[in-house]
Image (cartoon, grey):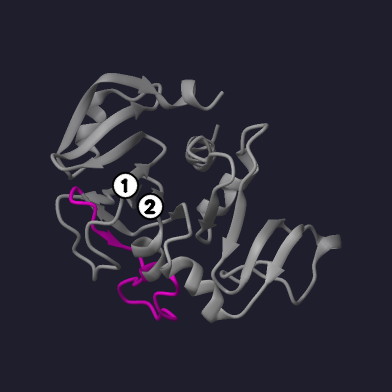
């Protein structure tokens, strides 16, 4: 499996029946392709949609139906559209069970930086600040490094999206849970040693006594 598929498959294992889930743009949207059989979830898009379906194929494109990232998507038969105030009422009201989003940096305290790219013009933070505070569970799905540098730090260096909000980090190398004592590594990718993981991670890591392989959780 390629790195993004490893991440998407593992994140999808966190989805449970009847949950309302928000997927960030990019890699997080791939998780919808790997939902286990028998698991029924509802996807929400903060631009005003509930019951969002998959990314639209060329013959399915409706120019009026896009997700928050501007991708053309489908909507399920039980889906609905509404205005931004209703959408953020769901988010701020604590009705979103899980939000899955990418990050530029995450630190061992669960702080998140994902809205500004140094040296580049950005449109703003979107709904991320509301989502990570309003959702019941926050999962960061991202590649472990960027240009060879760790994205998982002792302390974020970029402007924060929010403080102490991340519950779980899933990369192609490991699954980490944010605890009061720091980052607990519960799963590691096959072919990666604990020593290699520590070397590629700036943050301090706590290795679980029951460490498992990511791949064994995504069959």
Q: Is residue 108 above or below residue 124?
A: above
* Residue 60 sits in quarter: bottom right
Residue at figure coordinates x 27%, y 65% from the top left: 162
Determine the CA span between mark 2 and mark 1.
5 Å
Q: Which numbered marker is on residue 167?
A: 1
**What's the magenta region?**
108-129
**Residue 143 appears in view:** yes
Task: Give the percent coordinates (x, y) of residue 55.
Answer: 70, 57
Task: Give the percent coordinates (x, y) of residue 103.
Answer: 36, 58
* Residue 128 sits in quarter: bottom left
Element under disc 1: loop
Residue 142, magenta (yes or no): no
Dots 2, 1 in contact, CB < 8 A? yes
Task: Give the percent coordinates (x, y) of residue 70.
Answer: 62, 72
For marks 2 and 1 on the same chain, the one whose residue lies earlier in the sequence: 2
> Residue 133 or 176: which is nearer the viewer?
133
Q: Is residue 69 above or below residue 170?
A: below
* Secondary structure that dominates the magenta span: loop
> Residue 64 or 41: which is nearer the viewer?
41
Residue 119, magenta (yes or no): yes
Horizontal side of 149 relative to 8 (left or right) equals left
The quarter of the image holding the C terminus is top right
**Residue 73 appears in view:** no
Element under disc 2: strand
Q: Which residue is mark 2?
A: 138
Horizontal side of 34 relative to 106 (left or right) equals right
Residue at figure coordinates x 29%, y 39% from the top left: 177
């Amino acid at each position: 499996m390629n790195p993004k598929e490893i991440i998407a498959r593992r994140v999808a294992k966190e989805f449970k029946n009847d949950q309302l889930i928000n997927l960030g743009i990019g890699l997080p949207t791939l998780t919808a392709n790997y939902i286990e059989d028998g698991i029924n979830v509802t996807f929400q898009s903060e631009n005003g949609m509930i019951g969002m379906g998959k990314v639209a194929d060329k013959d399915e494109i409706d120019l009026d139906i896009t997700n928050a990232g501007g991708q053309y998507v489908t909507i399920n038969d039980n889906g609905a559209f509404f205005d931004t105030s209703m959408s953020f009422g769901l988010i701020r009201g604590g009705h979103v069970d899980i939000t899955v989003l990418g990050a530029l940096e995450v630190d061992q305290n669960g702080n998140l930086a994902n809205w500004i790219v140094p040296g580049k013009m950005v449109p703003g933070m979107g709904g991320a600040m509301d989502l990570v505070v309003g959702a019941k569970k926050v999962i960061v799905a991202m590649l472990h490094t960027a240009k060879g540098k760790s994205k998982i730090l002792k302390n974020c260096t970029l402007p924060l999206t929010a403080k102490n909000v991340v519950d779980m980090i899933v990369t192609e190398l490991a699954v980490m849970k944010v605890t009061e004592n720091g980052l607990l590594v519960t799963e590691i990718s096959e072919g990666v040693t604990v020593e290699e993981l520590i070397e590629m991670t700036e943050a301090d890591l706590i290795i679980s006594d029951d460490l498992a392989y990511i791949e064994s959780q995504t069959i």
